[in-house]
Amino acid sequence: MRDYTTIDSEVKNRGRLRPMAFERRSVPITEDDATIRAALDNAAVGALLPAVAAVTGRLDLLHVDLRPDPSNVFDPEGGLTEGQLREARDLASAALAEWRDLGCPAPAVPDDATLLRLMAHVVGEENEGAYFELLKEELALGGVDHRVPSWHAADVAPSQAMRVVIVGAGMSGLVMAHRLQQAGVPFTIIEKNDDVGGTWFENLYPGCRVDVPNVLYSYSFAQKVWPQHFSTQSTLLDYFRLCADEFDLRRHIRFGTEVDNATWDENQGVWRVQVRTAADGTTEVLETEALVSAVGQLNRPKFPDIEGMESFEGATFHSARWRHDVDLTGKRVAVIGTGASAAQFIPIVADQVGDGGSLTIFQRTANWLIPSPDYHEDVSAGLRWVYEHVPGYSQWHRLWLFWRTHEGLLPGAVVDPAWPDQERSVSAINELIRLVLVDYLTTEIGDRPDLLAKITPDYPPIAKRIIRDNGVWARTLKQPNVTLLTDGIERIDHAGVATRDGGHHEFDVIIYGTGFHASEFLTPMTVRGVDGVDLHERWAGDARAYLGITVPEFPNLFCMYGPNTNIVINGSIIYFSECEAHYISECLRLLLAEGKQSLACRAEVHDEFNDRVDAANKAMAWGASSVSSWYKNANGRVAQNWPFSLLDYWEQTRTPNPADYHLS
């Protein structure tokens, strides 16, 4: 039997092998000094100096006075002056020219002591110790996947059955499948759609794109050079398709199939999962030792509760089920909702209706906008050159963004109980953020006081999802064919919308940009655990899970992107999915190593964890504010958000504590 406290050489080798599509081979530098220096103007200094120092071995490049301040979240260069930026790029350019003249020798993977020095330039010495292992995983220098499972089922328990059914082939389901395959655990993925990708397969509305930088919204072990800083739906779908192909996962996926129900058989120690094929409606029961729900939170469109919706005689649809057969040219179009999806498609709809049509936007709650000038921009040729010619720059850039957004604006969301007027802001930091965001709105639309009053939120920043904007929102609202209404909707009738001010507005098309049933986890599946207890009846509309993953009385059931695992302003949800996949695989290892059939969370552990999460969420802007948001369920509890740091979740999902579970 192997010692599973360390990663054996075979697993290390597996972790080093990247599929061809994600293998990064740098192009040798042959360009002259001036070309190198010009390209570096496109690089982030917070990533550039450690990357070049690692490549060249020139640790003397890491000048303390050129170290950016990652807490300066509104400046992509961390508060460095123009002079400091120029000095840093000059140093890096000279070092790369020397490296070029030596023939661009392959850099060695830094040892831990060197890596600590390099990381200190990004995070500071005061942070590198606690975060070192986490940051080392995220950095993945040398093509090493540090999150590859440190065990293999054939070694741990070669004769014990351990099969897994994963529900969903989106971002979370694919990473779970990848880890199980590495660990030698048989699995089947049930996917209701005809392809992988989840939300990126289903959401086809115009303008759909990610609002997290793509170097973060991608697997740590499958990095690439993206065409844009924030890629579009089609690019993201292609990425997940490529992952499914490169990791050889498609042969394990049953497409066009949906789970109707799942029932735990305590005597046999298996889940009986009834699946239904969409093509002919036939059903089948699968037996599996473990069941993983990877259906996500944002996969069931939500319509508002407005009287008379069904009576409208024109075309109507939800943004998540976009009707591309409806030509909007010259039409009178209404959009109900101004959330994240609506903010993306509204500018395009405004152009589509044209001068002969009109767009009326019904806004319930104004959004805070965060300035993002590169939101729609392609990655520049200069930055692409850096990615291609400076080994490791991509990874260091990812780490720089990870660290800046790791805590991100999180301290600005913490409530100061002594702060006055907490419906406006919740602390001094939060008020500073509010002033910065108000200044941006004023700059963008101050020439239209009527619009400025409508689009300036009256709740604290971070209490609701902040929308990225590159100026397109103001430009759209100023168009002569666009009207923003905030009076509230009274009802919908056959011809249009009646508002609470007594007005009536006729339309040809109504589009709902009203979000998803985020709090209704695992719907519409019926899931029955010990003694037939129904999961949705147990939750009663208030879903909870230990670490967002396990639920008492439901052995061997694991959730991904489950209750309270949404992150608001600090990083990428893919990070959480990677943590969850690691934890779930370690739970399976525990079962195999102990020769046990089932693992069920202890109720007291589950309850204590949720008490801590609830208390922390109440002390955050999104919990303290009365503003309506999808973060809260029908009971008013914040059922989505993780209120702690990313390090906290990483530490809690390293290794399952057997004392947290009933093992039988």
Image (cartoon, grey):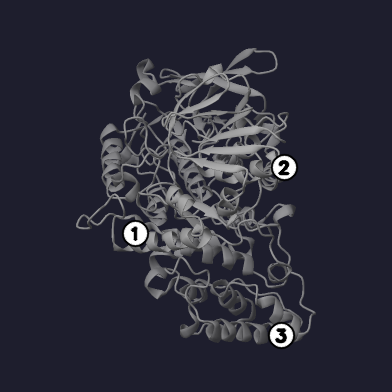
Looking at the image, residue 408 sits to the left or right of residue 507; the answer is: left
x and y percentages locating residue 187 in the rendered image: 59, 32
- Compare marks 2 and 3 and give the one earlier in the sequence: 3
Whether residues under marks 3 and 1 lie with C-beta atoms below 8 angstroms apart, the answer is: no
Q: Amino acid at mark 3?
A: Ala
* Residue carrying label 1: 430
Residue 312 picture location, percent across and down: 57, 20
Q: CA distance from mark 3 to mark 1?
A: 45 Å
Label placed on residue 245? 2
SS at mark 2 in the image: helix
Q: Toward the viewer: 334 or 502?
A: 502
Check residue 239 in the rendering and tell me which mark sits there, or answer none: none
**Closer to the camera: disc 3 or disc 1?**
1
Q: Is residue 124 above or below residue 557?
A: below
Crowd tier of the residue under label 1, counting other residues whose Cα lies within 10 Å: few below 14, some 14–19, many 20 or above = many
Instruction: Mark 2: give few (<14), some (14-19) or many (20+) Cα within 10 Å.
Output: some
**Furthest residue to the right?**
30
- Residue 402 appearing in the image: yes
Mark 2 and mark 3: Cα distance apart in space: 39 Å
Mark 3, residue position = 97
Determine whether, in the image, residue 331 is placed left or right of residue 496.
right
Residue type (three-letter) at the residue carrying disc 1? Asn
Amino acid carrying mark 2 in the image: Asp
Q: Nearer the viewer, mark 1 or mark 2?
A: 1
Q: How far is disc 1 from disc 2 in space, using C-alphas?
A: 44 Å
Nearest the camera: 504 or 610?
Answer: 504
Location of residue 606 (image quadrant) = top left
Indicate the quadrant containing the C terminus: top left, top right, bottom left or bottom right: top left
